[in-house]
Amino acid sequence: MKKIFNLIFIAASSILLFTSCEKVGSLPLYSAAAGGPSLTSSATTVAAVPADSNKTAIVLTWTRPSYSVDSTNQKFIIQLAPTGTSFASPSAVTVVTSLTKSFTAKDINTIALAWGFAYNTAYDVDFRVISSYVNNNEQLSSNTLKIKVTPYVVPPKVVPPTSKALFLVGSATAGGWGNPVPDRAQQFTKIDSVTYQGTFYLNGKSEYLILPVNGDWTNKYSVANNSLTGLSDGGDFGYNLSSNFPGPAATGMYKISVDFQKGKFTCVKVKTYGLLWVPGDYQGWNPATANTLGSPNSDGAFESYINFPAGGTFEFKMATTPDWNNAFGDGGNGTLSASGGNLKVPSAGFYKVNGNTTTNTWSVTGTTWGIIGSFAGSGWGSDASMAYDKNSNSWSATITLAAGDEFKFRANSGWDLNYGDTGADGSLEAGGDNIKGYAAGSYKVTLFLGNSNYYTYMVIKQ
C-alpha cells in the first residue's frame, strides 16, 4: 500500500513542476512621457471692472503630455503665482482629463487680492500647468506664461462712512455714553478706503458703538446679536443693527480693526490693567459695582479718582477681587491690612486715590481742577476753574483760544499734580506735554479722570 502512495505523490509533483515552468508572454512596458504639456492663453492681460465679475476673463489651453496610458488617468494642476516668487506658494486649481480651464474675472480678482495686491494696480502673474497621473506620479511642468493682472475694487460688504471718520462711544470707553466723544482718544485712524483701526482704553464687561459722525446718534455701526460667544474678540458688524458691540471681559488697552470690505471687526488685547476694587459708603458697599483703581503695568501700584458725595460716612475699603474675600482696610499710618478697619476720606470731594498691594500702602488727595495755559485770562499765571458734573463724572470749563495757544490741566491751582498730552493722542500723562493744535475760537474743554488710571479730555468748539 505504501508503494502506491509514493507513486501517486511522484506523479503529482511532476505535474506541478511542468506547470510552474510553463513560459508566459512578456509583461507590458510603459515608457516615460516624452514631454510635458504646452500651455497657451486667450489673453495676456486681465483688467476687468466690477460689472464683469462673472464674465470669463481668461481661458487656458494646453496640449496633452505623451504619457503611455489612457487620458482618463491624467491630472492637471494649474498654478498661479506672483512673478518672481518661483511658484513658492502658488494658488492652484486641479483639472482631470480636460485640456482647458476658464477663469472668471472674479476668480482672478479673488486670488490677486488674497496675495495682497492693491486695487487698480497692474501686477505680473505667472501661470503654468503641472501634469501627472491621477496618483501624482510622473509630474511634468508646462512652459510658464506671464500675464498682467489688475485687481478691481470689490463692492464692500458694509458701506464705509461717507464722513471718512469713525468714533468710539459707550460704557466701555473712557468718555462713556456722552456724545460727542473725546475725539483724540476715541477716533479711529483711516488705513485705507475700507479699513479703520485704533488702540483704545476699554472698561471690562461693558459695551460700545461706532459712530460715523462725532456728536450725532442718527447712524451707527453695531452688531446683530451681542450675546454670541466670542464676539467680544471680533466678528460680523453692520449698519444700524440692533445690538451694541460687546466689550472685552478685562479692562485694558485694545486694538480695534474695522474692515468694511469683509464686514468684519476684530478686538485684540494690547495689555490688560490690574484692578483694585474700592467698595464704600459712597456706592452702597457693593464690591462688584464699585469704582476701581487701575494698574496699567500690573505692578501692584493702583490709582484713579473717586467722587465722595456729601451726606455719607466717606468710608471705604480696597479689594483685589470684586467681593469681600480679599479686602483690605486701614492698618494705620497709611498702611493696608486685611484685618484693618474702614479707610476714610476727611470730607466730601473728588479724590485721587492710590493703593499699593506690594508695599501695602494707600493715600488720598482731595482735588479741584482748572486749566492753565497761554490763552487769554490765564497767561500761565492763573487757572480757568472747571466745574464738576456728577452725571458724567467729568470736569469742564469754557476757554477762548488764539491761534497757537497751549494749555494743561492742574489740580488745586498748583503744579504738584498736572496733566498734559505727550504724543497728542488724547491720553493724559502726569507732567505731560502742553496740549495744542486747535484753531482760534471758544471751546468747551472736558476732563475725564474717573477711569481706572486712564485719563483723557475733550475739546469741542462752541
Image (cartoon, rainbow, N blue to C red):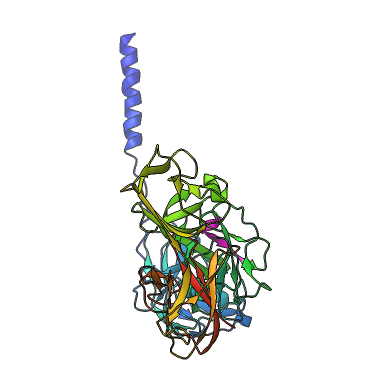
**Above or below: residue 45 compared with residue 225:** below
**Above or below: residue 219 compared with residue 340:** below
Residue 262 shows up from this direction: no
Residue placed most toward the observer, 43 or 445: 445
Residue placed most toward the observer, 317 or 205: 317
Q: Quadrant of the C terminus?
A: bottom right
Residue placed most toward the observer, 173 or 376: 376
| Left or right side of 303 for 209 | right
Residue placed most toward the observer, 208 or 383: 383
Region rendered in magenta:
231-237
The location of residue 221, given as percent across then percent down, is: 62, 69
Q: Identify the residue at horizontal 34%, vertical 78% (top origin).
A: 84
| Left or right side of 206 for 436 | left
**Above or below: residue 15 compared with residue 21:** above
- Asked if the magenta segment contains residue 235, the reply would be yes
The location of residue 112, given as percent across then percent down, is: 48, 75
Q: Quadrant of residue 240?
A: bottom right
Q: Identify the residue at horizontal 62%, vertical 65% (top origin).
A: 222
The location of residue 28, given as percent across then percent down, is: 38, 55
**Above or below: residue 72 compared with residue 156:** above
The location of residue 166, given as percent across then percent down, is: 56, 74
Q: Quadrant of the N terminus?
A: top left
